[in-house]
Amino acid sequence: MKNRILSGMRPTGPLHLGHLFGALKSWVKLQDQYDCFFMIADWHAMMSEYEDPSRLSRFTIECAADWIACGIDPEKNAIFMQSHVKEHLELYMVFSNFVPLGWLERCPTYKEQLREITTRELHTYAFLGYPVLQAADILLYKANVVPVGQDQLPHIELTNDIASKFNNLYSGSIFHDIKPYFTKEAKLLGLDGRKMSKSYDNFIALGDSEATIKKKCMTMFTDPERIKLSDKGHPDKCNLRSYYNIFTPERASEVDEYCTKALLGCTECKKKLGGIISDYLSDIRHKREALLKDEDKIHAILEKGAVKAKKVASETMAEVKKAIGMF
Ligand code: TRP
Ligand code: SF4
C-alpha cells in the first residue's frame, strides 16, 4: 500500500501564484508516489468568513477547477470538501474533550492571526479550535505526510501532540506520528514585495486575464534607486528579477545586463514580464475556464472524492469510537 498524503486549502478567495508555487506544484509531483487526499477546507474557511459566507461556495468550485487545471488528477486522487465528510466534525469533537485550552491559546498562528486580522471578529470559540479540526483532518486519513507551508508547522506539532494524547488516554495505537513536508518550490513575493496573500491584495490569480496580469505587473515593486531610465539598476533589489528567475530563468542574465547597464527602462521590463507570466499561465487559464463551463462535472468530481474519503474516514472513526467505548 502506498503511503498517504492529506493536504488542504481554505476556499476564502481566488487561488494565486503563491498557491501554485507554494503548494500545487509539489502536490502534482507527490500525486504519483502517494495515495492523496486533497481537501477543500470549507469549515475552516467558515471560521473566518462566518459573517459573509455567501462567496465560499463559488470559491470552492473555483478551487477545485484550479487544482485540476494545475494538474491534480481527480482520477488518481480524492478531491473533496471537508463538509461532505461528516467524520471530520466527529473526530474534532472527540479531540475537543481533551485538548487543553493552553495548547490552543499558546499557538503562534492563533496569536498572530488575532493580531493581524482586524477586519473580522476572530475571538470565537471555533477559531480557537482551528488546529483541533486540522488535526482531525489529518488523523482521520492516518496521513503519513502532510505537505504544507512552513507557517503550518505549529499545527503539525499540535496534531502529533493530540495523536499521542489520544493514544495514551485510550491505550490505543490508532494514530502514529505524521511528518510535515514543506512545499515551497520557489520564493515568490507579492507584487508589493510582501508575502503574496489574498488579504494584502498583492497577488496574480490563476484565473486573471492577460490584461489584468499586465496591469498588475505595472504596479510591481522595483529597485527603489532606479528612478530615471539612465540610472543603473540593481536586479538583486528588484522584485521583478526574482519573477524572471522563476518564469524564464534562461532570460534572467539578459535582464541583469540591460538593467545594470541602463539599456532598458523599468516600464518596458514590467511589460515584458506581464507577457511572460500571462503566457506561462495561459494553459492553466484555458483549462480552468473550460472546467468552469461545466460545473455539474466539478460537483460530480467532489462527490466522487467524498465517497473515497468517506471510506477511509469512516473506518478510522469506527476504530476511534471503539477505543473510547462508544457504540
Ligand atoms: N490550515 C491550512 C491553511 O490555512 C488549511 C488546512 C486545513 C490544512 N486542514 C488541513 C492543511 C489539513 C493541511 C492539512 O493552509
Ligand atoms: Fe527591475 Fe527590470 Fe527595472 Fe531592473 S529594469 S530595476 S530588473 S524592473
Image (cartoon, rainbow, N blue to C red):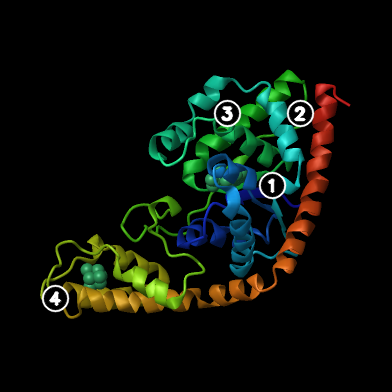
Circle 4 residue = 229
Is the CB of the residue bearing disc 1 within 8 angstroms of ligand 1? yes
Could you tell which of marks 1 and 3 lies nearer the N-terminus? 1
Q: Is label 2 or label 1 in front?
A: 1
Residue in view at x 63 percent, y 76 percent: 290
Residue 237 shown left or right of residue 60 in the figure: left
Which numbered tag is attached to residue 173? Answer: 2
Residue in view at x 80 percent, y 35 percent: 317
Question: CA separation, marks 2 and 1?
Answer: 25 Å
The x and y percentages for residue 62 are 60, 62
Question: CA separation, marks 3 and 4?
Answer: 55 Å
Question: CA separation, marks 4 and 2?
Answer: 67 Å
Question: CA separation, marks 1 and 3?
Answer: 19 Å
> Mark 1 Cα within 10 Å, few/some/many (few <14, many 20+)?
many
Which numbered tag is attached to residue 125? Answer: 3
Is the CB of the residue bearing disc 3 within 8 angstroms of ligand 1? no
Residue in view at x 83 percent, y 40 percent: 315
Identify the secondary structure beneath mark 4: loop
Question: CA separation, marks 4 and 1?
Answer: 52 Å
The x and y percentages for residue 254 are 28, 78
Q: Quadrant of ligand 2?
A: bottom left
Q: Is label 4 or label 2 in front?
A: 4
Q: What residue type is labelled 3?
A: Tyr
Residue 321 figure quarter: top right
Could you tell which of marks 4 and 2 lies nearer the N-terminus? 2
Q: In this orientation, which residue lies closer to the viewer: 168 or 278?
A: 278
